[in-house]
Image (cartoon, helix red, strand yellow):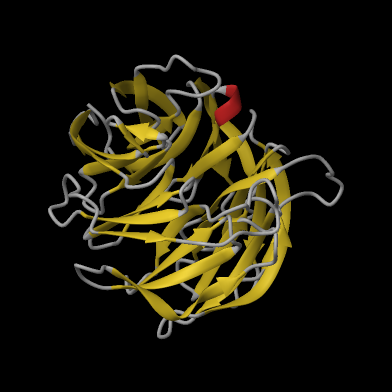
């Protein structure tokens, strides 16, 4: 018998085919039960046959798990895929519902609107965004729209062309923000209905500092503020968001590294605590979590400290809805580290057992 007050499900997406595993692995998504009284993670299952589920999303009803299949070929065709899996509430077991092509190469991110009407998939390598109908709350249909970005950025290696890395729906579900690492822009689209769910906004978005490389974004839970973690520059940019026009205006850009660090680094993920008091970003290279305090109504940040993640290349992390726990996926050391969050200072402390899992890429917390 599990305690519903303390037991939660944790889903971990991994790379099944990579340089470390060139022949591939059968298990792609791992399922854990997380005890919020102790910080312990216990594996209760895994799913086979879902290739490179490198990013996950949960339907608002909590019954469907979506995973991108980050590949260059899927179902015998060029590109990647999108998989939908049903969650059995009592056990957390997953059952594959269906898979569709992502209509782009190497999809790396999926995001759903709060009404679970549309799923937005970022195809990194092809620089495109695919929109899938999910009105039934179950399996997605074929893509309703594919938007192609064009252009290039400052970095001759990473920004030779557009590379959409993520999308984020605003709290009203009227606008979609799209982070393009390749062209240093956050594009804004109005969300409508079929046959054209996304319409370019006016103004169309905002350009970041050349070479910034925007990757992931987060809305402040109770202020009109958006944060973007910038992979190439290892910075976080803060924007005021106008909920009526969908426009963005930059407030501040802050480094996510210690001032005395001079090695190679790429920033990866960004999350806020549910109360909006603390913000965290992950660093691959410095292999740390940068912790910030939100210090003003405008959302400006003040550095708290940098905390080692207990492994290499923390690609993704998740904060529990109670704001007390943070789970970090150290992709290149095959390890998940649990941290407790001090509610007064925002400081992190290792907690629970370290969990070994091959190439964890994404962590998602759901109700048990």
Percent coordinates x, y for residue 209 in the rendering: 69, 66
Front residue of 247/351: it is 247
Residue furthest top in the image: 23
Residue furthest left in the image: 136
Front residue of 2/206: it is 206
Does residue 332 appear in the picture of this structure?
yes
Image quadrant for the N terminus?
top left
Please give the count of numbered marks on the rendered protein.
Answer: 0
Does residue 5 appear in the picture of this structure?
no
Q: In which quarter of the image is residue 85?
A: top left
Q: Specify whether 72 is left or right of 173.
A: right
Q: Residue drawn 43% across and 58% down?
A: 167
Q: Residue drawn 23% across and 63% down?
A: 115
Image quadrant for the C terminus?
top left
Q: Quadrant of residue 101?
A: top left
Q: Quadrant of residue 53?
A: top left
Examine the rendered structure and indicate whether residue 190 appears above or below residue 263: below
Q: Specify whether 182 is left or right of 262.
A: left
Q: Specify whether 27 is left or right of 187.
A: left
Percent coordinates x, y for residue 3 in the rendering: 28, 34
């Amino acid at each position: 018998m599990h305690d519903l007050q303390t037991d939660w499900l944790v889903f971990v997406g991994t790379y099944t085919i990579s340089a470390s595993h060139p022949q591939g692995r059968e298990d792609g998504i791992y399922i854990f039960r997380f005890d919020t009284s102790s910080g312990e993670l216990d594996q209760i299952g895994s799913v086979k046959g879902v290739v490179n589920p490198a990013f996950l999303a949960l339907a608002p009803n909590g019954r469907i798990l979506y995973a991108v299949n980050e590949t260059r070929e899927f179902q015998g065709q060029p590109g990647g895929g999108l998989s939908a899996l049903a969650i059995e509430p009592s056990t957390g077991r997953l059952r594959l519902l269906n898979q569709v092509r992502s209509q782009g190469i190497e999809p790396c991110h999926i995001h759903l609107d709060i009404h679970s009407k549309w799923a937005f998939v970022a195809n990194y390598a092809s620089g495109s965004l695919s929109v899938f109908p999910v009105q039934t709350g179950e399996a997605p249909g074929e893509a309703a729209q594919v938007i192609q970005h064009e252009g290039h950025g400052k970095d001759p290696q990473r920004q030779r062309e557009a590379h959409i890395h993520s999308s984020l729906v605003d709290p009203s579900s009227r606008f979609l923000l799209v982070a393009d690492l390749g062209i240093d822009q956050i594009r804004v689209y109005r969300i409508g209905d079929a046959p054209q769910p996304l319409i370019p906004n006016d103004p169309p978005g905002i350009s970041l500092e050349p070479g910034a490389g925007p990757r992931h974004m987060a809305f402040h839970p109770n202020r009109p503020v958006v944060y973007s973690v910038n992979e190439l520059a290892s910075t976080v940019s803060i924007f005021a968001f106008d909920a009526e026009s969908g426009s963005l205006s930059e407030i501040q850009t802050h480094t996510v590294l210690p001032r005395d660090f001079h090695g190679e680094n790429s920033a990866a993920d960004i999350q806020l605590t549910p109360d909006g008091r603390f913000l965290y970003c992950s660093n691959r290279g410095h292999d740390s979590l940068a912790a910030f305090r939100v210090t003003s109504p405008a959302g400006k940040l003040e550095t708290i400290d940098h905390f080692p993640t207990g492994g290499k290349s923390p690609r993704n992390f998740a904060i529990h809805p109670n704001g007390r726990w943070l789970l970090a996926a150290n992709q290149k050391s095959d390890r998940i580290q649990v941290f407790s969050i001090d509610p007064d200072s925002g400081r992190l402390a290792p907690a629970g057992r370290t969990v070994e899992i091959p190439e964890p890429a994404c962590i998602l917390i759901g109700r048990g």
